[in-house]
Image (tube, helix red, strand yellow):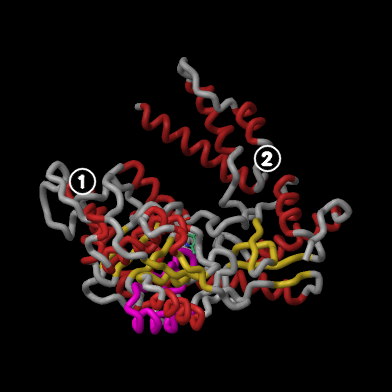
Amino acid sequence: MDVQKDLDTFNSIFSALLQDEIDNPMSKTMDGEVLFKKLDLSLNDNPLPDDEFNEALKDLVLSTPKTASRRFFNQLFGGRNSKAMLGDLLAVVLNNSMYTYKVGGPQVCVEREIIRKICSKIGYGNNSGGTFPTGGSMANLMALIMARDHFDNDFKHRGSEHTLIAYSSTESHYSIAKNASFAGIGRDNVRYIETDQNGKMKVAILEQQIKDDLSNGLSPFFVNATAGTTVLSTYDPLDKVANICEKYKLWLHVDGALGGAAMFSEQYKYLLKGIERSDSFSFNAHKMLGTPLSCSMVFAQNKKQLYESFGNDAEYLYQADNDDLNLGKMSLQCGRRNDALKLWTLWKSVGAKGLEAIVDYQFHLSKVAHQYIEKHDDYTVFSQSPSVSICFNYKDIDPKSLCSALYDHEEMMVGYGSQGGTSFIRSVAVNTNNSEADIINFFQVLEDFVARNEDWLDKRVE
Ligand SMILES: Cc1ncc(COP(=O)(O)O)c(C=O)c1O
């Protein structure tokens, strides 16, 4: 049977990948055009014999950047959780769509159970609900659309009658700006609120800006607070922002794509204090919890808002069961991949206590990194523990030049960011397969590389 042969091919390529991640944690880096030719990625008219096809596939897999290796610190995801991977592989095999109970069956109940559990964890009441969009950016879009329709329920029919104004910090994710354009709000109608030196939104400035906009006849309607900013992984003061939103009757959305995972930790859930007062919340399990991409959720304090903004009748689709089971009535798209199963397999296997251990361990690894930096004079630190981002500069080396050189020389994948006009390296402690030794090794690889190449690496310009 073809499928059995292909499963054997899968096993063989996956085993080769696991070994290669140890032997060559960095894939060869080369120009995209050169790699395209080297791997022969061209699509042709004639079929390939099986052995040539398998070889081409293996070459492609082994040449792909290894996000599960111990040299990958580049993004807000990394590592591999096998239980979550198992769930995702089965979702592919089952190939359901999550719009109806008729087609999704118990998978729909899996999704509902996750939504129910997380709503209760963050203190949302019995009327709350949620769904799995395709990513954190889309989760934020859904929140913005719900806020828009809550402010003006006819917006979706006749377009805008007011100039709606949204607020978000200068450190918030770029999806806020893009979504303002998609939702018909307009990019220019997002007010970026200044942050303190740690990247937290300054609430007094938020309030002043709202007052100014009101006195100019504009219509404030939405505040996005970030729980775990993309660069510094800082938490906005949710309680204080909630006070402002209540005072001016604005929708409060909490973008917890990165840092929302703190909800699972007794030790760190204080970072989310006030989240129960928000109207919506977004969260990516593919970041701190370590499921495969994508595993994003958006929650609404009142699920009626999800139906109001995303429900649509469709006789050809909704032919049985009720809205509670036909999840398509709450979602952005029609056909929808099963992104819930991978989180369910992880959660079911390790329990909420296991998820807590994952989150605590990441904060621990980050603390190990911060302690290392503080003990070594050649480093300047920009992030503050607890934070899964470790932001720093080393000696007088330009961070961009250093990150590019580490990548080009196949040493390590790490990126850079900036805050208040200063650039720095941003390493991320979200790979739970890493040990403390891997974190220390990160710095040692970097230091050894600089020692060998300091003469040509660009210097920082302040
Ligand atoms: C704070 C924050 N919000 C939203 C997103 C977007 O998530 P996604 O990449 O799943 O679209 C990110 C991604 O890094 C993020 O850091």
Q: Separation of disc 1 and disc 2 at Cα?
A: 43 Å
On the rendered structure, is 434 left or right of 449? left
Check the image and name the residue furthest to the right.
455
Task: Classify 435 as above or below 339.
Answer: below
Place of residue 324 in the rendered image (x, y in percent of width and height, measured from the top left):
17, 60
Place of residue 163 in the rendered image (x, y in percent of width and height, measured from the top left):
36, 65
The residue range painted magenta reads 237-263
**Residue sitting nearer the eye, 217 or 36:** 217
On the rendered image, what quadrant is the N terminus found in? Answer: top left
> Which residue is at a point 36% across and 43% down the rendered structure image?
92
Mark 1 residue type:
Val
Place of residue 207 in the rendered image (x, y in percent of width and height, measured from the top left):
45, 81
Check the image and name the residue furthest to the front.
216
Residue at mark 1: 103
> Which residue is at a point 39% across and 84% down the rendered structure image?
243
Is residue 68 shown in magenta?
Answer: no
Is residue 250 shown in magenta?
Answer: yes
For label 1, count other residues whose C-alpha is less than 10 Å away and answer few (under 14), some (14-19) or many (20+): some
On the rendered image, what quadrant is the C terminus found in? Answer: bottom right
Task: Classify 462 as above or below 405.
Answer: below
> Which residue is at a point 36% across and 66% down the rendered structure image?
164
> Which residue is at a point 42% across and 74% down the rendered structure image?
213
Q: Is residue 355 visible?
A: no
On the rendered structure, is 329 left or right of 24? left
Which of the numbered marks, if any, corresponds to residue 28?
Answer: 2
On the rendered structure, is 406 left or right of 63? right
Q: Say how many tags the image has.
A: 2
Q: Is residue 390 visible?
A: yes
